[in-house]
Amino acid sequence: QLTKQGEAKAKTPEGIGDALTKAFLRLNRELLTQGGFDAEFSGTTAVTALFRGGQLHVGNVGDSRIVIGERRGEHVIAVPLSHDQTPFRRDERQRCKAAGSYIRTGGQLDGETRYSVAWEDALGVDDEENSGDPPRLWARDLRGPGCAFTRSLGDAAGEAIGVFAAPELVS
């Protein structure tokens, strides 16, 4: 994708971001349309990094992570370069709800715990580490697909409820 844009545009963060987005979307389209692969309830997350012109560019879809080790004194600390796209994030949750998703945990569907708007409003990224039963995206009939991520590649059922393949970009 970078070579198709021309040399000048391919050197800018915007040009690289456009190329990464087009590559993710093209791969998604190929996964959904190729024969011999059942994409109805399939899908994967992905993250990529590109070093170009002294800059690092990251494209991320789903809950795959990219980190870099940074030396701080005598220690090496993991520094995140991407952010998970899950229903824990308010912006992702709202985007998927606008596309028709319902947000529930498995326990809420089974009647083990109660759903409330207050519960959903209180969800946050800090809850992610402590959740054995994460919030998931469901179709209006609450029968599927039950995605614990809000972006993916090659997930036909997920696309119907707002799970899409456009990456988040960080340069």
Image (cartoon, rainbow, N blue to C red):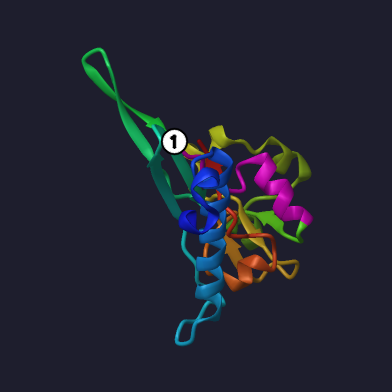
The quadrant in which residue 71 appears is top left
Residue 110: x and y in percent read: 62, 62
The quadrant in which residue 33 appears is bottom right
Q: Residue at x 42, y 49 (%)?
A: 48
Local crowd at mark 1 within 10 Å, few (<14), some, or many (≥20)?
A: some
- Outermost residue, top direction? 73
Q: Which residues are magenta?
A: 82-98
Is residue 130 depicted above or below 38 in this figure? above
- Outermost residue, front direction? 7
SS category of the residue bearing label 1: loop
In this view, the residue in front, 121 or 116, is 121
- Outermost residue, bottom direction? 36
Residue 37: x and y in percent read: 46, 82
- Circle count: 1
In the rendered image, residue 87 lying in the magenta stretch gets the answer yes
Q: Read off the residue under disc 1.
A: 81
In this view, the residue in front, 169 or 129, is 169
Is residue 85 at least partly visible in the picture? Answer: no
Residue 2: x and y in percent read: 48, 54
Is residue 125 at least partly visible in the picture? Answer: yes
Residue 170: x and y in percent read: 52, 38
Amino acid tagged 1: Leu
Q: Residue at x 75, y 66 (%)?
A: 140
Is residue 145 depicted above or below 104 in this figure? below
In this view, the residue in front, 23 or 135, is 23
In this view, the residue in front, 56 or 129, is 56
In the rendered image, residue 48 lying in the magenta stretch gets the answer no
